[in-house]
């Protein structure tokens, strides 16, 4: 498959068939990349208008496929179909900065995220390799672990204060970009609605290539309207296995909610978030 934009043909061919799927790690590194310079970090943060110091929104979506042999239960979803997880991080402009594909549907988002190369690198080498500025972080929903580098909402199980509700609204208003990104991805590459293969490996490669092409199109000005996608219900708050990391994240989140780090960039705040 070749993709051509404005006379500029992409310099690689992807064959979506049972014999050959051409995708290389170099290609992924070229088109799906984490910010490197201070200017790049600043540009991403400026794109998020509701929550301070965000360098990406994280969430997951499901890619349906045929039933993998001998792995029926682990890949089944709540609609009794079979799927793999696509975990993505994007900026406010719907550009992927990180993707991790392949865990079965039955895996909780927190488990998928915790086993990604990004988190393993952070745990091994320290968060500074992805978050050189202490105030920077990702935003995710309640299915993800709270860390100093990943802010999640206050639990709705508790009686939330006015500031906590405002915090959650600001976070949610910026997190919607990842749902839009998945909508554009699946709208442009309809193959991702259902991958007609029994091979999990091939499904992973097809989904990864689609993410690469998504970024390629964006970087070449080929815009695509966001398709409506099913918004997955938020999973329960995860059981924290690192209480000290959670405590530090909780302290930072409380500071943000209290206004110590928040600049209140939203010009108009819906009254129901403050009631």
Image (spheres, rainbow, N blue to C red):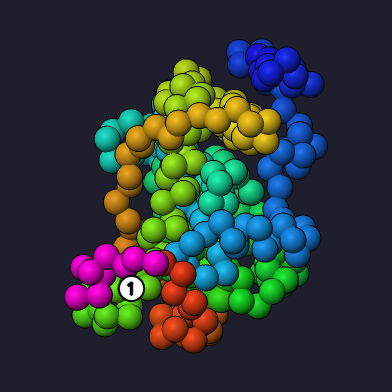
Residue 40, relative to residue 15: is it above or below?
A: below
Residue 44, relative to residue 133: is it above or below?
A: above
Task: From the image, tell me which residue sits under label 1.
Answer: 166
Name the foreground residue: 58 vs 207: 58
Whether residue 42 is visible? yes
Q: Secondary structure at mark 1?
A: helix
x 61%, y 71%: residue:
136
Left or right: residue 149 versus residue 170 is right
x 45%, y 31%: residue:
225
Residue 70 lies in quadrant: top left
Whether residue 212 is visible? no
Left or right: residue 4 versus residue 156 is right
x 36%, y 37%: residue:
229
> What is the number of callouts on the image?
1
Residue range in magenta is: 267-275
User: x, y percentage for residue 61?
Assistant: 44, 42
Identify the main secondary structure in magenta: loop
Left or right: residue 260 versus residue 122 is left
């Amino acid at each position: 498959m070749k993709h051509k934009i404005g006379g500029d043909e992409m310099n690689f061919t992807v064959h979506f068939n049972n014999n050959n799927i051409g995708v290389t790690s170099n290609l992924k590194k070229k088109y799906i990349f984490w910010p490197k310079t201070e200017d790049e970090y600043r540009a991403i943060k400026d794109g998020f208008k509701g929550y301070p110091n965000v360098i990406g929104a994280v969430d997951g979506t499901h890619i349906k496929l045929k039933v993998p042999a001998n792995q029926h239960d682990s890949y089944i979803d709540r609609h009794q179909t079979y799927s793999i997880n696509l975990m993505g991080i994007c900026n406010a402009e719907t550009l992927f900065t990180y993707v991790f594909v392949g865990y079965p549907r039955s895996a909780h988002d927190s488990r998928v995220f915790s086993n990604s190369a990004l988190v393993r690198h952070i745990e091994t080498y320290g968060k500074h390799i992805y978050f050189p500025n202490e105030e920077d972080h990702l935003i995710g929903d309640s299915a993800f672990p709270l860390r100093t580098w990943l802010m999640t909402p206050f639990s709705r199980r508790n009686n939330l204060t006015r500031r906590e509700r405002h915090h959650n609204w600001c976070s949610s208003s910026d997190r919607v970009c990842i749902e839009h990104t998945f909508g554009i991805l699946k709208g442009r590459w309809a193959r991702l609605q259902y991958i007609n293969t029994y091979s999990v490996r091939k499904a992973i490669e097809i989904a990864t290539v689609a993410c690469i092409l998504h970024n390629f199109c964006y970087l070449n000005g080929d815009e695509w309207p966001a398709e409506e996608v099913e918004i997955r219900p938020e999973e329960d708050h995860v059981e924290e296995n690192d209480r000290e990391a959670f405590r530090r994240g909780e302290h930072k989140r409380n500071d943000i909610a209290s206004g110590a780090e928040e600049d209140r960039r939203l010009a108009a705040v819906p009254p129901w978030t403050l009631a």
